[in-house]
Image: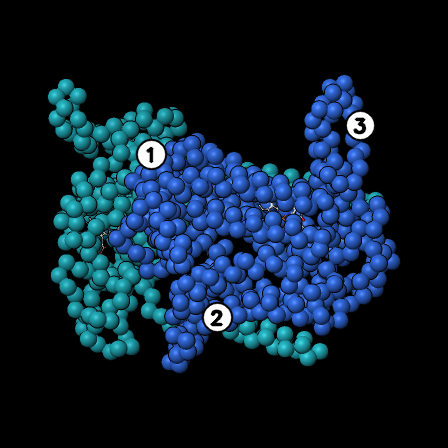
Amino acid sequence: MLRKGIALAALGLSLVVAAPAASAAEQKPVMKHLEWSFQGPFGKFDTAQLQRGYKVYREVCSSCHSMNLMHFRNLGQPGGPFYDPEYKNPNDNPYVKALAKDIQVNDIDTETGDTIQRPATPADKFPAPFPNEYAARASNGGALPPDLSVIVKARAGGPNYIYSLMTGYKAPPAGLKINPGQNYNQSFAGDLTPFWSGDHHKVPVGGFIAMPPPLAPDKVTFDDGSPSTVEQQAKDVAAFLAWASEPKQMERKQFGLGAMIYLLIFSVLLYFSYRRIWRNVEH
Amino acid sequence: MSGHSTYEPKTGFERWLDTRLPIIRFMKDTALDFPTPKNLNYWWTFGGILALMLGIQIVTGVVLAMHYIPNAAMAFDSVERIRRDVNYGWLIQFMHANGASMFFLAVYVHMFRNLYYGSYKAPREVLWILGCVIYLLMMATAFLGYVLPWGQMSFHGAVVITNLLGALPVVGPAITKLLWGGFAVDNPTLNRFFSLHYLMPFVIAGVVILHIWALHVPGNNNPTGVNVKSPKDTVPFHPYYTVKDGFAISVFLLMYGVFVFYMPDSLGDAINYVPANPLQTPPEIVPEWYLLPFYAILRAVPDKLMGVLLMFSAIAVLFVLPWLDTSKVRSMRYRPTARLYLAIFLLACLVLGYCGAHPPDQAIVGEPSGFILMDSDINSITWLSRIGALYYFAYFLLVMPILGLTEKPLPVPESISEPVLSHPAGAPAGATASPEKRG
Ligand code: HEM
């Protein structure tokens, strides 16, 4: 009995100790949570949104950020922003061809061996804005703009984080010292205590980011007439980056639905076979 | 392998083969006719689930290896290419990545099942030890595999773990250098890790064969822990357990599917989607969930070498478990006190897992106490890990030997059939998850 008591007490104690650490309200950067058309097991990308998002990337972000894993053909593959069922092979998709043609990529002239520029084809990768990391840093005050191909998977919060970051540039609170080349963003991770001259307990959330606010009202003209607010641009580019981080996401969910239904039926059948086979065994 | 064979070759070819290589006889005796206790519950289906998971990991792994490039400059992109451009590459890749977690989930259930029902006790000690060898190999394989995508956590995880081995006296530095293939984690490391990661699963498969051999000599344990007394206590493996295992496997696959199809990244760390950068250490280096308890034990000790030794002891102690448990009763159905200590042990493992995932200096509740003992604040994850680790070892080294001698177990049934046939009022409390009781 005593032993049982001790054991019970130990169990209780460890439960108390293990209670989710309700540590002091930590200063966390602001994360805004949005509804996304592609969330959940049945969610789907909104094609118009992906098209707008691509435009934001192309016209704004691509001047600093590469997307090395993306090819123009991806834009025309099933589930992509410019997929056209008439062109099963995205390399034949005239819209994708036209988009690619507007962009110059490096190549080598096979006659002379010289480096040349030529219009891109759907088979080409998205060209990187800088020839190498040093050039990228040199143009961005020493900071490196990360490749955006899988950025949505590479940050906790995914598309919500991208949206929050894009809309997180706020006027710095008085008392915050900002170094040249830095920008205050309430959604970027950091510790602002060393730069804060105000109340100890009211250090602003967020951090300093080297990226200047990339978006502004009417910076991009949307072909479908959607209002070009910062929020709209941010939401659309986040959706596009979410698609780009896993272009086969729709295929995954669709295939998954079939597989799950199949397994469910199979399980039910096996369960009844099990009951039937065991019906005469006492156990 | 045990018992006498009921196989009768029917065709001329079978008779001819049977006198030369009795492989059909062997298969029939081990996989179809094998007498199996008739009272096994669903916890006994995890062995079959594990066998399937090993198969899935090998098949998906071999296909992945056709497309993967073990080169520090290309590995990360090659994994992404598999997901983006290889036909059904996304499926294969997500199955393999999440399959590792499912494999560990199943192995932990399997091991706790053995702890609960005392399956490691005589005459199954060798079976249990082979299981421990498999578990050790699984951890090595998972660690090696996690390095291959060459993301930030892959790289820095490899740095941390290989450096740990370097702390071992005398042999440490040599082992580390051998693993690195140089003076730091780099391309040669990736190459040898890939080679070893491909090799290990086949070693595991070999040990699994021994494991099943060692199972078929004494036969299965069962929820009562009582030996099989007569043929009345058993049913042939096929069709009784093929169909029951099949059902359980199918349900397990459903759960696996939820991860693969709907939340393939939920068990991984976002930062591993950032390509490896040796110059930038992530703010926190955490292993995959299934290694967290050991990571917590490692960090609980202020001294690096002692930490490493304690971590290895945590696994080593499993090997001698059959000789630490002094109880004559196998199943905890009849050991209520032992059941309680096992529940606390499970809790301790979960607490250790929680500790492994959080920074060591983080306060458990509220603000740090300011009271430092053995280099760490009393109110810190480190101290919680220490308590967890203490119980982890105490359970094996104190509770198991002492309890077996002092406790008073409940009456144990005569045979497997007896408690079932007489339907005792108030079924043993240990018979929790056995919905098949109705079957
Ligand atoms: C690759 C991993 C493994 C595979 C494929 C595997 C496979 C199996 C199978 C098919 C059985 C018989 C069915 C069952 O009792 O569930 C079994 C039983 C057993 N396994 Fe494993 N096993 C694995 C890992 C382990 C590990 C890590 C341990 C312990 C450290 C272990 C210990 C045991 C024991 C003691 C039994 C006998 C249980 C009994 O009959 O009551 N196994 N295993």
Subunit bearing disc 3: B
Q: Circle 1 sits on which residue? A: A74
Q: Circle 3 sits on which residue? A: B8
Crowding near the residue tagged with mark 2, few <14, some 14–19, many ≥20 C-alpha atoms within 10 Å: many
Label 1, label 2: how many angstroms apart (C-alpha)? 52 Å
- When the figure is inspected, residue B127 is found, relative to residue A16, above or below; the finding is above
> What residue is at 60 percent from the left and 50 percent from the top?
B131
Which of marks 2 and 3 precedes in the sequence?
3
Subunit bearing disc 2: B
Chain B colour is: blue
> What residue is at 71 percent from the left and 24 percent from the top?
B20
Residue type at mark 2 is: Arg
Residue A70 in percent (x, y) is at: 30, 37
Residue A279 in percent (x, y) is at: 81, 44
Chain A colour is: cyan
Label 1, label 3: how many angstroms apart (C-alpha)? 60 Å
> What residue is at 40 percent from the left and 67 percent from the top?
B303
Residue B386: mark in rendering: 2
Q: Is residue B428 left or right of residue A120?
A: right
Kindly indicate whether the residue at mark 2 contacts the one at mark 3 (C-beta within 8 angstroms). no
